[in-house]
Image: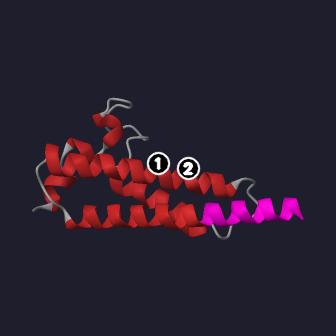
């Protein structure tokens, strides 16, 4: 049960691990940096009301985050054979954000349909 094993593995820089970008490339973000970008997007979502179709962007980001969390939980448990409370906590937050995004998406979609019917 060590977070160090997770943070020092090749999976901590997933794009270079998947050989999409070379190691050390500017786009080779660590999982922490990628998570920071995702959570910043969640944080500014309510402020950016001028973006068209923002609910679709939120739902896409939340779905991608949830799917990626499922992948990383698999890697954590079955590939690395480890447990990291920090990682697991962030994955739980991603699942909660997916649920909240789904509720937001359905609420705004239902409201738009009702407005069109009136």
- For disc 1, the marked residue is 64
Q: Are marks 1 and 2 in contact (CB under 8 Å)?
A: yes
The residue stretch that appears in magenta: 104-118
Q: Residues within 10 Å of mark 1 (few under 14, many from 20)?
A: some
Position of 94 with respect to 79 (left or right) is right
Residue appearing at x 57%, y 66% in the figure: 103
Residue 45: image x %, image y %? 62, 65
Instruction: Say whether residue 108 is magenta.
Output: yes
Element at label 2: helix
- For disc 2, the marked residue is 60
Residue 78: image x %, image y %? 15, 46
Above-or-below relation of 33 to 11 = below
Residue 86 image label: none
Above-or-below relation of 16 to 100 = above
Residue appearing at x 19%, y 62% in the figure: 84
Query: Looking at the magenta stretch, what is its main secondary structure?
Result: helix
Residue extending farthest right: 118
């Amino acid at each position: 049960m060590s977070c160090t094993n997770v943070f020092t593995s090749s999976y901590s820089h997933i794009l270079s691990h998947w050989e999409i970008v070379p190691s050390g490339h500017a786009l080779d973000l660590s999982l922490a940096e990628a998570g920071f970008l995702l959570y910043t997007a969640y944080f500014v979502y309510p402020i950016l009301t001028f973006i068209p179709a923002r609910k679709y962007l939120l739902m896409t980001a939340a779905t991608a985050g949830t799917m990626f969390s499922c992948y990383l939980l698999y890697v954590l448990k079955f590939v690395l054979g480890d447990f990291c409370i920090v990682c697991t906590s962030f994955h739980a937050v991603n699942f909660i954000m997916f649920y909240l995004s789904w509720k937001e998406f359905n609420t705004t979609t239902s409201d738009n349909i009702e407005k069109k019917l009136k």
